Amino acid sequence: MALNPKKHEMPAQDPQVRAHNFDEVALGYTEEMAVSEAQRCLNCKNKPCVAGCPVNVNIPDFIMKIKEKDYEGAYQIINKTSTLPAVCGRVCPQETQCEAKCTMGIKFEPVGIGRLERYVADWHNENATEKAVAPESNGHKVAVVGSGPSGLTCAGDLAKKGYKVSVFEALHTAGGVLVYGIPEFRLPKAIVAREVEGLKDLGVDVETNVIIGKTLTVDELFDMGYEAVFIGSGAGLPSFMNIPGESLKGVYSANEYLTRSNLMKAFRDDPKTPIMKGGNVAVVGGGNVAMDAARTALRLGADHVYIVYRRSMEELPARAEEVEHAKEEGIDFRLLNNPVEILGYNNPDDPRDPKNGFVTGIRCIRMELGEPDASGRRRPVPIEGSEFELDVDAVIMAIGTSPNPLIKNTTAGLEVNRRGGIVVNEDGLTSREAVYAGGDAVTGAATVISAMGAGKLAAASIDKYLSSK
């Protein structure tokens, strides 16, 4: 049978429909699509795709099970190394990782590994009836700070080995960036909740509304009998441009904007945590978070949404799929433009005017690409005299985040780098004995799967450390 040179397209909602709802955009493969896509896998002996996966999922073996229509068997293979398969199948950048290594991709399109992983995970969630069983305790206790992908992965791997694990989450819902940062239309929250429940079945305790560094310190966790601590607290401190007008009403960090919508349900008609809806919105930045913020603004009723990015489309860091979806939904990309000022309304004759202090526009300058910078991308250079204005009612800054300094400031002897990231060695160990860290708290904002890989590494290191005691 001749191999199909192209991967099967992912069924999706119509752009004109989905732009006005929060339902999941990608609809998932049918069984027929999944089996047909699995047939494209060459089952290479050296398995290059596995080397491209940060958590080393045995990709050819789980795809072979799909060919045999043994979907539960496929899930169990994935679950040996990945704690969050339904999440990874949706938000992992497979095109730059496992699929980038796929042998099929040398001449044709690579196998749709991520789409197959999603199919298998969804099949399991819809059909499996047996819950995970907590293994026999080994008598050791470990604390995990943060319930994002890094923390959940570390907790799951340790729980499977018999450790008593407690996860401490600052917010009122477990999941970290998976629930506050990624919109429902990309990652339904019910999927995250189910993954968390699976960890609880393994014996993991999840304590919400506990801010490590405020409610409890790392040192107090050791006083409570925990023998090791993993810090996976993410990078939740937003960055701004420090340009005039950033203190105006209607200027948000993407972190705040997405949290208000995703976690605090600001999209409801009577939200307890309101958010500006309607009007024109400018989102500054070009990463996945910028795409999420722009597409969320559209669904919240914005009349027109701009992406303002200082480089060209070739340098845009967001996933190609997210950019394509944003374009289909009508997001207006203003590339090679950079904001220099946020404009606002001010009526000194009537300080009680309710419009005082609100955003009315954004002033930008056109850019051109110069020589490459340290990242290898060509540095954007302003074009003198090219300033122009956009009429907007809200501005969302999506230009990056850094780790919150709270844990650093309350944990003696914890070394951090100049960006605020916790310094670790090759085993994920910090400068403090028995304190490990991983994910965005170490690297700054990165991908879900890379955070999972760091959590997996730390779990193995903690197991080795405590087993030797």
Image (spheres, rainbow, N blue to C red):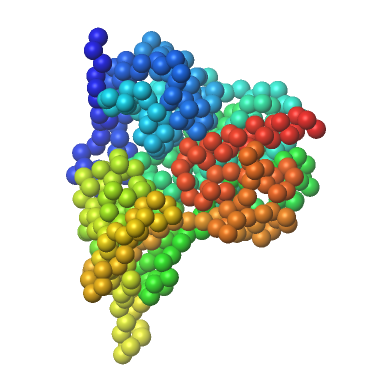
Residue 14 visible within the image = yes
Residue 122 visible within the image = no
**Position of residue 245 measured from the top left corner of the image (x, y, whole percent):** 37, 74
- Residue depicted at x 73% and y 34%: 465
Q: Please indicate whether residue 79 sits to the left or right of residue 272 in the image.
A: right
Q: Quadrant of residue 257 in the image?
A: bottom left
Quarter the N terminus occupies: top left
Front in this rendered view, residue 254 or 197: 254
**Position of residue 149 measured from the top left corner of the image (x, y, whole percent):** 52, 40
Q: Please indicate whether residue 370 sits to the left or right of residue 150 in the image.
A: left
Against 455, is 315 above or below? below
Question: Which residue sits furthest right?
Answer: 469
Against 80, is 352 above or below? below
Q: Quadrant of residue 297 in the image?
A: bottom left
- Residue depicted at x 48% and y 56%: 401
- Residue depicted at x 35% and y 83%: 352
Front in this rendered view, residue 16 or 374: 374
Front in this rendered view, residue 342 or 197: 342
Q: Quadrant of residue 462 in the image?
A: top right
**Position of residue 169 measured from the top left corner of the image (x, y, whole percent):** 59, 47
**Position of residue 359 measured from the top left corner of the image (x, y, whole percent):** 32, 72
Front in this rendered view, residue 107 or 299: 107
Quarter the C terminus occupies: top right
- Residue depicted at x 73% and y 57%: 412
